[in-house]
Amino acid sequence: MKLFTVGPVEMYSNTLDVGSRQIPYFRTEEFSKTMLECQEMFIRLAKAPAESSLAVLTASGTGAMETAVMNALNERDNVLVINGGSFGQRFSELCDVHHIRHTDIHLSFGQVLTKEMIEDKKGYTALLINGHETSTGQLYDLQMLGDYCYKNHMKFIVDAVSMFLIDPIDMEAMHINLLLTSSQKALALSPGLSFILVDPSMKKVIDNNTCVCKYFDLKDYFLNMERGQTPYTPAVGIVYELEDRLRQLIEESIDTVIKTAHDKAMYFRKRCKEIGLKIGDYPLSNGLTPLIFENGKAYDYFLDAKENYGLMLTPTGGSLSKTVLRIGHMGNLTLQDYDQVIEYFKKVQL
């Protein structure tokens, strides 16, 4: 079964090899060194300020989203949420759970987020966004949003779970104060770890806030990371997968990694147009291509490809389940792999 999904994704052979080994004891100097090196490489890949701090959480991406809300915001905040799909809605729901005042900018499917939608919004203290709304494939303009936040003295909190290592990110240039991601997307690791990277100004905010949850109190994570440890037992095996993968990414260079993702996406989209497949016409992430089926058979194609052709495509939930099917461009996939997807759609009755 070949995975064209958006997490978990096809893993690389070296990662599978690391994951097959005996998990060692981790309260050691050797493990601390591994963690500190991972922090340094994360900072480089995200183009974050050198003094930034990394928290390694044993949690899903949603766990990192909630951790960000609990630690970076409080009842005095008034937050803007870009709500353009199921993950934008998740940020909105997390604000409700933690009693954070917020206003949502709702985007209908295919509607593009523009500067005009936010430039008159005043009196807010933070902006929450999924840099790539994974439920639709829309890529937001983080530079535009970061400039807006910087100008208005707002905290800029970005969920980059399906954007990190896929689309260009420059935390410093984009004025991103908190960036979060997880292990099973473009990192192509086992699910189970998530990461929160904060700049020095956000760390001060977190240090002065009271977190309502002990396990996800980022102050503990940052304090422990000073010695290369976590406050509680992490997913140790995935940390070693991470170390190996980050070294590979640094060796390749982040620009090369992103270009590879871009080339995969462009190749697949070109081939889709050749056979008449309809693609979303809004700004798209390199991470996935949303295929639109006006015949309402999107989920039928997902089932057929999985059960009869060994192709695991990505279904879409909710109201888009019958019309949108997503093809991921993350992980260990080649251009020839995408030819298989094209051949499948050439066979079925569109």
Image: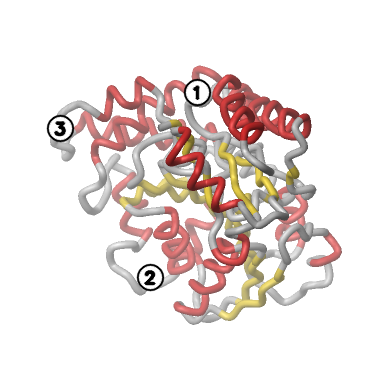
Residue 221 x/y as whole percent: 33, 53
Q: Residues within 10 Å of mark 2 (few under 14, many from 20)?
A: many
- The answer to whether residue 22 is left or right of residue 96 is left
Q: Nearer the viewer, residue 208 or 38?
A: 38
Q: Is residue 233 left or right of residue 1?
A: left
Pointer 2 residue: 211
What's the amino acid at mark 1? Ile
Q: On residue 250, which mark appears?
A: 1
Q: Which amino acid is tagged 3?
A: Pro
- The residue at 45%/77% (across/down) is 98
Percent position of residue 265, x then y: 66, 32
Q: Are marks 3 and 2 in contact (CB under 8 Å)?
A: no
Q: Quadrant of residue 201?
A: bottom right
- Disc 1, SS: helix
Q: Is residue 263 above or below residue 61?
A: above
Q: Is residue 319 above or below residue 305?
A: below
Q: CA distance from mark 3 to mark 2?
A: 31 Å
Observer-side mark, 2 or 1, equals 1
Per the rendering, the mark at residue 295 is: none
Residue ID at (37%, 30%) = 37
In the rendered image, residue 45, in percent from the top left (x then y), is placed at: 54, 33
Q: Which residue type does callout 2 highlight?
A: Cys
> Pointers 3 and 1 in contact (CB under 8 A)?
no
197 over 22 or under it: above or below: below
- Is 46 located above or below residue 220 in the figure? above
Please tell me which residue lies in front, 274 or 212. Answer: 274
- Residue under label 3, please give it: 24
Question: Which numbered disc flags the more N-terminal residue, 3 or 2?
Answer: 3
Mark 1: give few (<14), some (14-19) or many (20+) Cα within 10 Å: some
The answer to whether residue 14 is visible is yes
Q: Position of residue 41 (x, y in %)?
A: 46, 31
